[in-house]
Image (cartoon, rainbow, N blue to C red):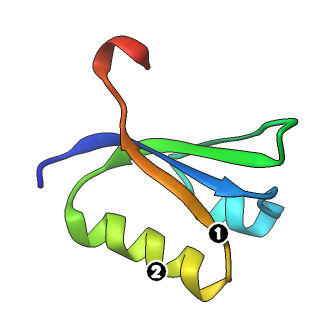
Amino acid sequence: MESQEIEIVVRGKLGPDLVAALDGFSVSSKASGRTRVVGVVLDQPRLLGILAMFDELHIDVISVNPVDAGSA
């Protein structure tokens, strides 16, 4: 996997400490109760690390999607 912008959608709102840990990512909460985390992931181990962190914190990941350059 090469560097790619990704979107991770999770259920609920992320606390300020977790948002700070996601430095370099844009985090936005929606009225629907979902949070969108968007940023560039340099390689697959980094992506897996983020997903493992969410899993350890019992954060429900709804989807992981590539972000098309035209939709960013």
- Residue type at the position of mark 2: Ala
**Figure quadrant of the C terminus:** top left
Q: Compared with residue 22, is residue 50 higher up or lower down, i.e. above or below?
A: below
Dot 1, crowdedness within 10 Å: few (<14), some or many (≥20)? some
**Residue 15 location (% of width, % of height):** 82, 64
Residue at 76% x, 68% y is 17
Tag shown at residue 52: 2
Q: Compared with residue 2, is residue 71 higher up or lower down, i.e. above or below?
A: above
Q: Residue 11 occupies which quadrant of the picture? A: bottom right
Secondary element at tag 2:
helix
Tag shown at residue 33: none
- Residue type at the position of mark 1: Asp
**Residue 37 location (% of width, % of height):** 57, 47
Discs 1/2, front: 1
Residue at 81% x, 61% y is 16
Tag shown at residue 60: 1
Secondary element at tag 1:
loop
Dot 2, crowdedness within 10 Å: few (<14), some or many (≥20)? few
**Residue 48 location (% of width, % of height):** 34, 72
